Amino acid sequence: MTQATALASLSRRKSGKTGLRLRGGWRINLLYVPALLLFAVFTVYPLVSGIGFSFTDWDGYSPGRAFVALQNYLRLFQDATFRLVLLNTFIYGIGSTILQQVLGLALAVALDRPFRGRSAARAIIYLPVLVSPVIMGTMYYLLFQYNQGALNDLVVLFGGHRVAWLSDQATAVVIIVVVNSLQFVGISMIIYLAGLQSIPTTYYEAAMLDGAGAWQRFTGITIPLLQPAFATSIVLNLIGGLKLFDMIKVMTGGGPGYTTNSVSTLIGVTYFANQSAGYASAMGVVLFIIIAIFTLSLNALMNRRRLEQQ
């Protein structure tokens, strides 16, 4: 008996002890049941309930709900505030993703080379990922706030005038994108480091013997062989950016007015402050659809490019 056959036989015996046999030869592993129950309770049920609420006029508190069909969705297309917030959401998602890929890949390439203190540098760059976005947002708010902000104190020290960094929509949105990217760039760095270390060094040695320069090796070997890492990093960063919430609430509160809100923060305002749970649910469904479309499209694109290169 080969090792593979022995392992397969052992696996069947173990699954037989924990599994439930059904008609037609199907078998259910009972160890999966707790995870499936948790997934159903905390993911499937809220999603289905949210879709149901989106077709109602409900304040979120009263027991009665009036069915309004597609009125909440039609209202979304006519809501100028929602269109502005949707644009902000795309900026947060796409802007953060692009910035994190550029910085993450650059840091990964720099820290892939052996030098003294390399492990400490990796840990320092990844450390902000472990910090709560609320804490990180508060730290940067103290840096950018108008009165007693560290950055404005430096501006005044050198003879300038205080700047309302977080009171202008365009400036505040850019700052949030940069801060969010700096906090989570460590995720991209780790993914790209793993991808770089999986590339055989023989490819680079052969390219150097053929006279390829550093840039040619990077574009001809590193970039193509990092396609799986690109797919993973881009999808993770894009999902995180599109559903950005904590950083916005702490740094600007969605203001001035609604101008720096994302769809996630606007859902909270609409549900709790405006007591319009049905309309907020419709926003949540739209956000879910947007994230699903982006994720599935990117995965399909990356898979197609990977197949073309094989």
Image (cartoon, rainbow, N blue to C red):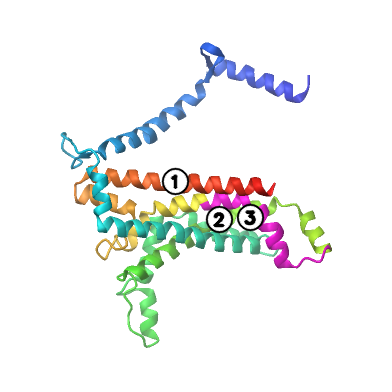
Q: Which residue is mark 2?
A: 188
User: Does the magenta stretch mainly form a helix, a strand or a loop?
Assistant: helix
Q: Which residues are magenta?
A: 210-234
From the viewer's side, name the closer residue of 310 and 62: 310
Residue density around tag 1, few if under 14, some if 14–19, many if 20 or more, within 10 Å: few
Badge 1 vs badge 3, beta-carbon distance below 8 Å? no
Q: Of all residues shown, which one is farthest toward the bottom? A: 159
On the image, which quarter does residue 205 sit in? bottom right
Q: Is residue 219 magenta?
A: yes
Left or right of 242, for residue 70:
left
Marking on residue 293: 1
Quadrant the N terminus occupies: top right
Q: Residue at x 35, y 83 (%)?
A: 156
From the viewer's side, name the closer residue of 123 and 228: 228
Kind of residue indicated by mark 3 = Leu
Kind of residue indicated by mark 1 = Ile
Place of residue 297 in the rendered image (x, y in percent of width and height, measured from the top left): 50, 47
Report, in whole angstroms, how far the alpha carbon at label 1 lies from the one at label 3.
28 Å
Kind of residue indicated by mark 2 = Ser
Left or right of 191, for residue 140:
left
Q: Nearer the viewer, mark 1 or mark 3?
A: 1
Place of residue 140 in the rendered image (x, y in percent of width and height, measured from the top left): 39, 66
Q: Residue at x 26, y 61 (%)?
A: 258
Residue density around tag 2, few if under 14, some if 14–19, many if 20 or more, within 10 Å: many
From the viewer's side, name the closer residue of 301 and 1: 301
Marking on residue 193: 3
